Amino acid sequence: MPELPEVETLRRDLAGKLVGQRIGEVYVLWPDCLQSCSPRDFARYLERQRIDALRRRGKYLIFELQGGRVLIFHLGMSGRLLLGGQSQGPGKYTRLILELDGQQELRFDDTRKLGRVYLVRNIEAVVGKLGPEPLGKGFSAEVLCSLLEGRRRRLKPLLLNQQFLAGLGNIYTDEALFEAALHPGTRACNLDKGEIE
């Protein structure tokens, strides 16, 4: 399952190749991956739009487009974004294809059909409820301490809650708790300052 580091790695890899390119033809092969509009409107809004920036928030990839809209991908458990030549065509699990002006295509493949795609004007409509970034500049032991204050939930489900912290998934939560020598079932309110640090 892609978690924050994998999504950030993908963002860095794609940004240098996609920023500045225009989207040409749009093919929606599985309409249920779209969350904000019909396949026809999705294609109509995206065609001829330039990709101005590529950002990440939690596990979401955010494409800022020239026309003021934002294209957002959440990869789910098995989603992948693949950049390749236009001659490749769709694969067995391809859900969406964006042809690009550089004679390439960006394919969204998703084996388990859990990924989602949004096309919105207001980014906060999709990512507005996410918690702070655990690798963000302003995140510290003090911030975590204030977030945990008064929380009775067990640590692992709390850390997996994207509204509490953005981007953590099962693997990194387990690794962080193991590294901190904390049992996943420990209640957040039972931690002392040293354990939080």
Image: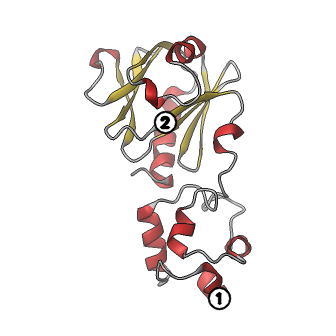
Q: What residue did someone put label 2 on?
A: 116
The answer to whether residue 74 is seen in the rendering is: yes
The CA span between labels 2 and 1 is 38 Å
Taking the spot 61% from the left edge, 62% from the top edge, the residue there is 134
- Give neighbour class at mark 2: few <14, some 14-19, many 20+ (Cα, 10 Å): some
Going by the image, does 60 lie left or right of 66? left
**Residue at disc 2, secondary structure:** strand
Q: What residue did someone put label 1 on?
A: 192
Q: How far across and down, in percent of the image, does residue 147 sit?
A: 70, 70
Compared with 193, 17 (above or below) is above
Q: How far across and down, in percent of the image, does residue 70 sit?
A: 64, 29
- Nearer to me, 46 or 85: 46
Taking the spot 63% from the left edge, 78% from the top edge, the residue there is 152
**Residue at disc 1, secondary structure:** loop
Q: According to the image, what is the colour scheme of the structure? A: secondary structure
Compared with 169, 113 (above or below) is above
User: Label 1 is placed on what type of residue?
Assistant: Asp
Taking the spot 50% from the left edge, 71% from the top edge, the residue there is 156
Taking the spot 48% from the left edge, 72% from the top edge, the residue there is 176
